Image (cartoon, rainbow, N blue to C red):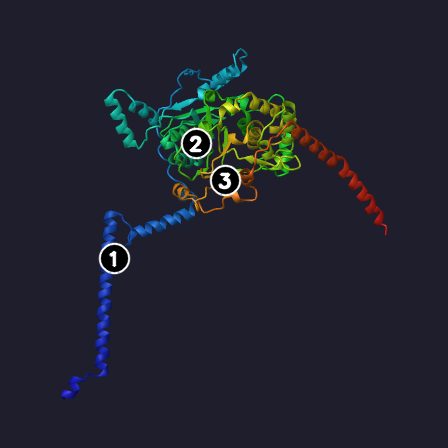
Amino acid sequence: GFKRLAVPSTAILGIALLYFVCVMLASQTALRSKLQHSIDVISATTNAPAEWFSWKTDVQNNHIAAAQDPAASTEEAEPIMPTLPLVRLPGWPSDFPDDLNDYRQSVLQNTSWASENEKHRAEIAPYVWHHRGPADSLDEQSRSADHETSQRAMREMARLGILPSPDRRANAYFVVLIRNRELNQFLPTLRQLEDRFNKRHHYPYLFLNDEPFSQRFMQFVAASTSSNVTFATIPSDHWSLPDFVDEAEAAEARRRMKESNVIYGGSLSYRHMCRFNSGFFYKHPLLQSVDWYWRVEPGVDFYCDLDYDPFMYMQENGKLYSFVIALKELEATIPSLWQHTLEYMQKTNATSDLMSFFVSKTGNYNLCHFWSNFEIASLNWLRSDAYDSYFTYLDKAKGFFMERWGDAPVHSIAAGMLLNRDQVHFFDDIGYRHESFMHCPDTVNSMSMKLKCQCPKRKNFDSSEGSCLPRWKSYVPSLWTQRDTDEALRLMREARIVDSVYDPKIVVERRRWYSFFSGF
C-alpha cells in the first residue's frame, strides 16, 4: 500500500496538469477583463486613447497623416515676424504722396535734375529703409565719456554677445542683390557670414532689389544681424533696356539662344542682372561715398573663420580686386566680347602685366575669369573713368542683350586690362561654395586651416579640369603692349577669314570630288 501512494499514476499527473492550465487561463482572462475595464474608465473620464503607449500611437498616426498629406510633413509653422524699427536715412526725403506710382513717373519725367545721381536718389527714396543694429548704437555708447552710460552699454553688449568694433575699419559694405522670395536661402548664408567674420567687425549691409522689399524680408534680415542694414530699390535706368537696343531684336536673340540651350539664354532678367553688376551697382546713390564692397549672394556657404579683416588687407596692401574661384566661361554666351575688348584696347592703347593671363597662345580669349558671385573690390576703381569708359563701350556694343555677356568675364577682363598682377588678390583662406563649385583651403597640410575651417567632404573645384586657379598660381606677369593687341586682332581677323572663306571653298571642292567618285 505504501508503494502505491508514493508513486502517483500517469492519470493523476495528467489531471493535475490540466487543473493547473485551467487556473492560469482563468487568471489571465480575469486580468485582461480588469485591464480593459480600467482602460474604458480612463477613456470615458479623460477622453484618452484606449491603448497603452499612446505616444507611439500618436507618432504612428502622424506618419499616416503625413503620408496622406505630404504638405503636413514638410510645412513648418511660420515664425513670428519681428517688429524692429525701420526708419528713413538721415538727409533723405521722408514724406511722400499716397500714390507712389505717380510720384515715380513725375520724377522720371522731370528733366531739370542737376545730375543722374540726384534723379536716381529721388526715384528710389520712398523704398529706402534702414535699421540701426544694436552693435552700432551700443558700441557708440560704450565709448561715451559718461562712465555710467559706457558701463551700461558694455553690460548690454555682454548680455547680447556683441563684440566691440575694432578701432580701425574700412569704409565698406556688404552688397546683396536679392529678391524677396530668396529670404529663406539667404538667412543661413547671413548666419555663416556673421559667425565666421562679421560678428567681430560689424560691417553694414546694403540690400538691393528691382522691386520694393517686403516687411517680412526686412524684418527677418534685420533681426538676423547686429549690424546696420539698409534696403533699397534699383533705379529704373539701371534695370531696363537702353534706348539703343531694339526690343524685338533682343527678344529674337533670346529666342535663338534658348533654342540653342544656352544657360539663361532666354532670360531677360538675367541679362538685366549681368548688366547691372557690370556697370551700374557702383553708381547706386547709397554707395557713392563707400570705398569697398563685398558681394554676397543667397544660398552660398562660408566654411572658414576669418581672424583678420579682408577689407583692411586690401586697403593696406594696394589690392583693388579679389576672388576665390576662377573658372572658364561658356563661350556661347560671349561670342563677340573679346573682339570688342581688343578693339577698345587698340583705341585706348591699354597696357598691363595681367592681360596675358586671359589670352591663349593663338591670341584669343582663353575664357578664364574670376567668378564674381564672390568678390571684394574697390568701388573707387569701378567708378574710375578707365573702368566706366570700358563698360560704356561694351554697353553700346549691345552684347549684354544681343548675346548674354556676364559680369564675371567683364570684371575679369577689365582687371586684366586696367590692373597689374599685384593689384589682384586670391583669398585662399576663405572657404566658399556657390552651387556645386567649392573652394576650400588646404586643411590636410595646414593645422591652422584645419582648426579654422569646416569644409564638407566634396571635391574641391581648384583641382577640377575647368578651374583656372593652377594657371593663376603659375602665372608670371608679362607686359601686354599695343603690339600684342594689334597682333591678337590680326590673328582673330585671319581666323575669321578662314572660317568664312576658305572652309566653304574646301567644302565645295570635297563635294565636287565626292560627286565625281560616286559615278564609279
Q: How many angstroms separate mark 1 from mark 2 (CA)?
A: 72 Å
Q: How many angstroms separate mark 3 from mark 1 (CA)?
A: 59 Å
> Can you give x and y, in whole percent of width and height, for residue 157 in the image?
29, 29
The image's mark for residue 435 is 3
Of 28 and 461, which appears nearest the observer?
461
State the residue position of label 2.
Answer: 310
Q: Quick one: label 1, few (<14), some, or many (20+) residues within 10 Å?
A: some
**Where, quadrant-wise, is the N terminus in this rendering?**
bottom left
Res 146 seen here? yes
> Can you give x and y, in whole percent of width and height, for residue 197 in the image?
39, 34
Residue type at numbered disc 3 = Glu
Of 399 and 328, which appears nearest the observer?
328
Q: Determine the residue positioned at 39% across, 47% down.
A: 65
Q: Secondary structure at mark 3?
A: loop
Q: Determine the residue positioned at 27% across, 32% down.
A: 159
Residue type at numbered disc 2 = Pro
Res 405 seen here? no
Of 486 and 224, which appears nearest the observer?
486
> Can you give x and y, in whole percent of width and height, for residue 463 in the image?
53, 44
Mark sitting earlier along the chain (3/1): 1
State the residue position of label 1.
Answer: 36
* Horizontal side, residue 18 vs residue 300: left or right: left
Quadrant for residue 512, please give it: top right
